[in-house]
Amino acid sequence: MTQKEQLQLGKTLWNIADDLRGAMNADDFRDYMLSFLFLRYLSYNYEEATKKELGKDYPQLAETDKRTPLSVWYGLNSEEIVEFEKQMRRKVHYVIQPKFLWSTISEMARTQDQDLLVTLEAGFRYIENESFESAFQGLFSEINLNSEKLGKTNTERNKQLCTIIQKISEGIADFSADSDTLGDAYEYLIGQFAAGSGKKAGEFYTPQQMSTILSKIVLLDSQDPSAGFRKRLEKILDVTCGSGSLLLNLRTRAKENGGYVGKIYGQEKNITTYNLARMNMLLHGMKDTEFEIFHGDTLLNQWHLFNEMNPSKKIEFDAIVLNPPFSLSWEPNDTMAEDFRFKSHGLAPKSAADFAFLLHGFHFLAKEGTMAIILPHGVLFRGGAEKRIRTKLLKDNHIDTVIGLPSNLFYSTGIPVCILVLKKCKKQDDVLFINASEQFEKGKRQNTLSQEHLDEIISTYQFRTEKEKYSRKVSMEEIEKNGYNLNISRYVSTSADEIQIDLKDVNTRLASINQTLQTSTDKHNEYLKELGLDLI
């Protein structure tokens, strides 16, 4: 399927969502819509796999027969079901019973079956607890099929669900159901819902352009980016992963450049967004063994994976990307000052946890790895605790590049942001500053970066090039003289040069003009005098 067709599928589904949600909050309807799309993908993938597995034994049904082929096979081969499901778990890593498949659910919706709500509820619980080898408990926990937002009575709710599912089924009937297609449609819908969610969107969505910048930066060779993209990353991490779009973008860019990503790790505090991330991974064709998403608070370090006290057993990541909530208030307790993540640099202030997220990620970065994090500009120049952390990172030569971006690129905020690129074993002893704040295309609601803008940022980072009013390599001596202030405009200004005025030259030219004027006046007066007229 072409990119144009994938975009069309996304728009088709968005129009369905926009038409059907009525007075329902966009965030609430998003969860229903994306869950049904997820069920459709799992079902299609599973049915295709069973068709291949059963071969000539796969039932061929007449067009008028609305039963699913798998339900017919189950009915005829009850004694073989257990072994068949074991085989399917080995091959596709999950099982869905025929009565919970999308084809069954959509047919119930088409016929306005009164049992659809009950069947769908049971199907969600089955997928959460029994489908996968590693149980996905709570995957649909935020989907309340008995919510009054769907209707005041069970009958009304059942009818509304029938309508939603039937419309989705009709809308995607003419499109491919492969993981790339539905995955891209899922991403498109997340972006559209984010656009309608205002500041709340910052909780779960990083615009694809921003994701691409971070992804390409961390994929390049850490010691010599000019050498090109790394071919193998065993582990990648995002501890504020939202819906997982940033991690998936990184995986996609790696594959585009002939690279390999072993396993994806993500952490998310918000339960709804955590579920979105897990669905997003599976919907993009990832097996449950290829990713691990944890529900918990990053600042409190609730993931047991990150609490190994033995340095030799500490988990480390080849690439880390982060888009944490900007300047989040937090409450570090007294013991956190001795926390292994913060002990060497100190605690971020209560008013802004930006550096706490940065230090958490940086602690787990591998020596040959690269970390890229999106932050507000305040981290570059604020004083107090943040200055101490910034100074320590600079003196240890861990800050590689500072990139300034235009304002209004995010759904969640209009403020301009920056990207900090960090490394543990950095080759250069200077800091590259890129001021891309003036490079954007203005939009009605959000500004965007063109492909040319994206390419220039990546190329400037990769080859560490210097360009007037855009990029510059700054020595540590100069940064130290500026009190370890990293304010980008201090080093790379985009303002027009002031015109230098030579007052002596101006005075000489004025005198010359006055002399010419006087000569012309005297000559004119001579003519007037000859004619007997009044002089000027």
Image (tube, grey):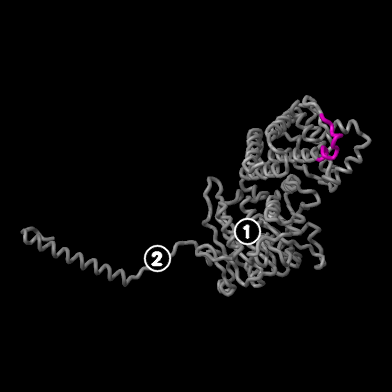
| Secondary structure of the residue carrying numbered label 1 | strand
Q: Position of residue 395 (x, y in %)?
A: 65, 72
Residue 176 is left or right of residue 310, and the answer is: left
Which of the two discs, 1 and 2, sits closer to the camera?
2
Look at the picture and state if 325 lies above or below 174: below
- Asked whether the viewer can see residue 350, the reply is no
- Asked whether the viewer can see residue 488, the reply is yes
Q: Position of residue 375 (x, y in %)?
A: 62, 58
| Secondary structure of the residue carrying numbered label 2 | loop
Camera-side residue of 397 and 465: 465
Identity of the residue drawn at 75% across and 67% down: 338
The residue lying furthest to the front in this view is 56
Question: What residue span does the magenta drawing correspond to?
Answer: 49-60
- The residue singled out by tag 1 in the image is 375
- The residue singled out by tag 2 in the image is 499
- Disc 2 residue crowd, few under 14, some 14–19, many 20+, Cα 10 Å: few
Q: Distance between the Cα atoms at labels 1 and 2?
A: 35 Å
* Three-letter code, disc 2: Ile
